[in-house]
Amino acid sequence: MPKKSWTEKLHDSKDFPRIEKITEKMRKQWGATGTVVIPQPIEVDELMRRVPKGKLTTINHIRYALAKKHAVTICCPLTAGIFTNIAAHAAFEQAQQGKKDTTPYWRTLKKGGIINPKYPSTVEELKKRLEQEGHTIIKKGKNYQVKNYQQHLITF
């Protein structure tokens, strides 16, 4: 069986979205009670696509929007991170195939405005894209952060 492309993974909803009760183990891990949504990868991508040039979002902001959309306590942080990565790799894959209107994944940052080093291409390329959109990038330990990223965040 051939390996799925990133774009195929993006459109493979499996049995998601799925809403579950937060277990005791999850409560200890996440500090939340109530319900959790495991979203579809495409739902994450749809929010990432809505971030206009010059603006930013974070994986946590996407999680808040998905929790609100599904009327649950939280959106699963693990799957949200995985699906953000799938959306980024699918966009990169599509751009390599010549598609123009791809998801601007470089505008979705990790907590604290950190550039996601797991995204495709290099951190240098991601920095360059963000700088071209008017952002200043600063070194923060071993990571890179968008300076004053909070001023550029959008809400969904």
Image: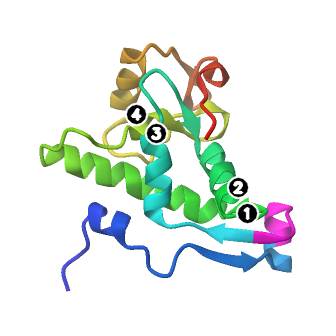
Task: For marks 2 and 3, give the CA distance.
Answer: 17 Å
Report the Cα–Cα distance between label 2 and label 4. Answer: 31 Å
Q: CA distance from mark 4 to mark 1?
A: 35 Å
Point out the tag, 2 or 4, that comes first from the N-terminus: 2
Q: Are marks 1 and 2 in contact (CB under 8 Å)?
A: yes
Q: Are marks 2 and 4 in contact (CB under 8 Å)?
A: no
Q: Residues within 10 Å of mark 3 (few under 14, many from 20)?
A: some
Q: Looking at the image, is 126 positioned above or below residue 98?
A: above
Give the amino acid type for the residue marked by disc 2 in the picture.
Answer: Lys
Does the magenta-highlighted stretch encompass residue 111?
no
Q: The N terminus appears in which quarter of the rendering? A: bottom left
Q: Residues within 10 Å of mark 2 (few under 14, many from 20)?
A: some
In-image side of 32 versus 8 (left or right) = right
Q: Quadrant of the C terminus?
A: top right
Bounds of the magenta segment = 27-35
- Disc 1 crowd, CA 10 A, few/some/many (<14, 14-19, 20+): some
N-terminal-most mark, 2 or 3: 3
Of the two numbered discs 4 and 1 in the rendering, the one whose residue sits closer to the viewer: 1
Q: Which mark is residue 123?
A: 4
Label 1 vs label 2: CA separation? 5 Å
Q: Which residue is mark 3?
A: 50
Q: Work out whether mark 4 precedes mark 1 in sequence or the reverse, and give the earlier one.
A: 1
Picture coordinates of residue 50 (x, y %)? Answer: 46, 39
Relative vertical location of residue 89 with respect to residue 78 in this rendering, above or below: above
From the top left corner, tell me how far across and down residue 80 is, in percent. 57, 59
Q: Amino acid at mark 4?
A: Val
Q: Is residue 67 left or right of residue 54?
A: right
Q: At 36% across and 28% down in the image, what residue appears?
A: 124
Q: In percent of the image, x 31 and y 40: which residue is there?
A: 121
Cα gap from disc 3 to disc 4, whole angstroms: 22 Å
